[in-house]
Amino acid sequence: YASPAPALPLPAALYGPGRRNSDGVDLTVDAMRQPLLDALARTTVPSMPMTDPAEVAAAVARAHAAFASWSQWPVERRAAILSTAADSMQARLPHLCALLVKEAFKTWGDAVAEVREAIDFLRYYALHAVQLMEPVLLPGPTGESNELRLEGRGPWVCISPWNFPLAIFTGQVAAALATGNTVLAKPAEQTPAIAREAVAILHAAGVPHDALQLLHGTGETVGAALVQAPGIAGVVFTGSTEVARLIARTLVTKDGPIAPLIAETGGINAMVVDSTALPEQVADAVVQSAFRSAGQRCSALRLLCVHEGIADAVVEMVAGAARELVCGDPGRLATDVGPVIDADAFANLGRHLERLRRTARPLFAADVPAGAPPHIVPPQLIEVQAIADVDQEVFGPVLHVVRWSGDPLAVIDQVNALGYGLTLGIQTRIDSRAQAMAQRARVGNVYVNRNMIGAVVGVQPFGGEGLSGTGPKAGGPHYLLRFCAERTLTINTAAAGGNVALLAG
Ligand code: UN1
């Protein structure tokens, strides 16, 4: 049956930051300067107690009990609650941004974009659930009626990452709730406070407390206990490929029904630049894609494959643009690149660079000013010999550069051979070549002659294939389907008539 993309107002995220004034200050953020700075001064990050894994079984039991009524509410009522939550996120935007800055070290531009993305997820899934969950009458033989219905499955476990601690958290939870499921949400242990704000907003909007429960803890403790719990109906996970594999293994080996897993995992994302590309455009797209959010997006550019004919010009321009980036305290309006999330992430990047130093050639590294906070990794370019040299995802502002010549489709083949399949950038002025390259690529999201991050809900449904995930795409028209049980109801209407006649006789 058709699941049309819902007719939506333009997503709020499309009005997100991006335009900059001559001082490099984001204009959207600048317009909200005072409310944002006031919120920053008022906001502290509360500490949150960890959930005892022994409490998981009782939480799952409560989620089951709540499912009995929540799943029976009309979808319109659930959707109205999610829309109310979206409104209250909008009203609390400065506070939510301040918390993102303080807890997750987001820059203001990234924080504003993230709150808007969370709002978009709420509105999109609310609208889409209403369309999707309308029972569909299917044509069939005369004398019977056939109906296809979508219904919630039960309690879902939502495990979300620290890099989009509000947007991805809210997106997972909203999708599960809209479709009539109840939720056990485990946010990343680094960012529980912003998740707690989102949950408080959803509860205040009308989601019953047992239909949405927040469990705070690590993956090894609370996460594992949730996935192993008998009776969970599904798991939606964003994080590493390795952990997705562990979850999948647990789901298929434990007793009972096999619960579905939606996993959005890592990527070694490439941009392939041919000799016809415009270096200025490439430089802008590269700086946005590789260095924004300190490179801590799974969509971020890791591997710049540039034709040898323009490689020097492109590298020089990228380095020139990256030199202008302001590294430092994310609470300052002009900051472009803040710290990576924690000491472990910082150490991992250090080890990666150390390993590469033996075979690769550093091309450029930005300055980190004295007095900057800890764990800032300077945006940098490092040249490797071959695409296959970059064999693992590194989560930070480190861009690997490789030169190529010959057939651009052969470059795509080498990128495919890495096994990941999340985002791909293509830069060329030959339309037919862009089409051929896009078609050859086994990735979820292809971007031509622009940056390759910041997928907008409902506009660029986001998610990968291969080692990058099991789909369906978040913010797309097929996502909610996976959260639903599909049920048909066939009634022999002729027999019913006969029975009534018999009884009456
Ligand atoms: C992630 O980084 O985990 O397109 C996924 C983007 C974002 C990516 C989110 N929507 O950059």
Image (cartoon, grey):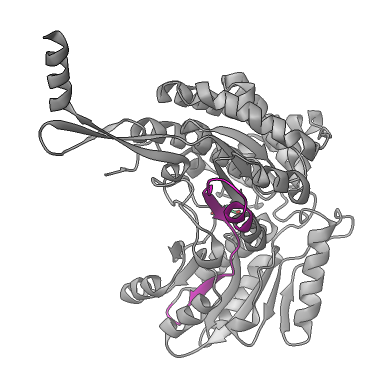
Residue 461 in the image: above or below residue 417: above
Check the image and name the residue furthest to the bottom.
Answer: 406
- Seen at 45% across and 22% down, the residue is 72
- Tell me if residue 57 can be seen: yes
Residue 386 in the image: above or below residue 500: below
- Seen at 36% across and 32% down, the residue is 133
Residue toward you, 306 or 168: 168
The percent position of residue 62, horizontal first and vertical second, equals 64, 26
* Image quarter (top left, top right, bottom left or bottom right) of the C terminus: top left
Residue 221 among those drawn in magenta: no
Check the image and name the residue furthest to the right.
Answer: 371
**On the image, which quarter does residue 283 sit in?**
bottom right
Check the image and name the residue furthest to the top.
Answer: 504
Residue 135 in the image: above or below residue 477: above
Report the number of discs.
0
The percent position of residue 84, horizontal first and vertical second, equals 52, 22
Residue 352 in the image: above or below residue 395: below
Residue toward you, 487 or 100: 487
The percent position of residue 494, horizontal first and vertical second, equals 12, 26
- Seen at 50% across and 38% down, the residue is 175
**On the image, which quarter does residue 214 sit in?**
top right
* Image quarter (top left, top right, bottom left or bottom right) of the N terminus: top left
- Tell me if residue 333 can be seen: no
- Seen at 53% across and 47% down, the residue is 259
Left or right of residue 81: residue 440: left
The percent position of residue 148, horizontal first and vertical second, equals 29, 36
**On the image, which quarter does residue 277 sit in?**
bottom left
Residue toward you, 340 or 155: 155
Magenta part of the protein: which range? 249-276
